[in-house]
Image: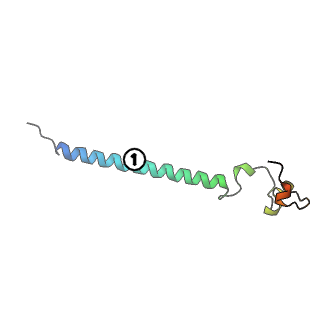
Amino acid sequence: MQHDSCPPAVLYTATRLFIVNIMRFLFLLVLLANVALLAFGQGFMGPPPSEEGRSPRQLSERNQHVVEFGPAVLAEAGRGPG
């Protein structure tokens, strides 16, 4: 005859609940770490790491060299044969 303090079903359920709670905690910890890393990389906590060492620029100064103005061309006139 065994003298256990609790039946095996109760012990199994308690162990399972403990493991489930640990897994929930680890999931939330990883999720929080991902959100914090995303916020850091996007610059919500100061200048982003990709801009390190650069002088800050205004939004109006970014990519101005990309925009080029030329003579106006109609859509039909601008198409080639085909």
Q: Residue at x 35, y 48 (%)?
A: 20
Q: Please, which colouring scheme is shown?
A: rainbow
Please tell me how many numbered marks the rendered image carries. Answer: 1
Residue 43 horizontal side relative to residue 54, left or right: left
**Please, which residue is most extreme toward the right here?**
71
For the residue carrying disc 1, how many other residues have a C-alpha within 10 Å: few (<14), some (14-19), or many (20+)? few
Q: Position of residue 6 (x, y in %)?
A: 17, 46
**Please, which residue is most extreme toward the left here?**
1
Residue 12 horizontal side relative to residue 40, left or right: left
Instruction: Residue under label 1, please give it.
Output: 23
Say if 35 sits above or below 60 in the image: above
Q: Position of residue 7 (x, y in %)?
A: 16, 44
Residue 77 horizontal side relative to residue 20, left or right: right
**Please, which residue is most extreme toward the front here?**
82
Q: Position of residue 17 (x, y in %)?
A: 30, 49
Say which amino acid is labelled 1.
Met
Say if 24 sits above or below 2 in the image: below
Q: Nearer the viewer, residue 28 or 82?
A: 82
Asked where in the image residue 62 lies, by quadrant, the reply is: bottom right
Q: Residue at x 12, y 40 (%)?
A: 3
Give the quadrant of the N terminus.
Answer: top left
Q: Nearer the viewer, residue 5 or 73?
A: 73
Q: Nearer the viewer, residue 5 or 29?
A: 29
Q: Residue at x 19, y 42 (%)?
A: 8
Q: Nearer the viewer, residue 73 or 66?
A: 73
Q: Position of residue 65 (x, y in %)?
A: 86, 54
Residue 11 horizontal side relative to residue 38, left or right: left
Q: Residue at x 70, y 49 (%)?
A: 49
Asked where in the image residue 73 lies, by quadrant, the reply is: bottom right
Name the secondary structure under disc 1: helix
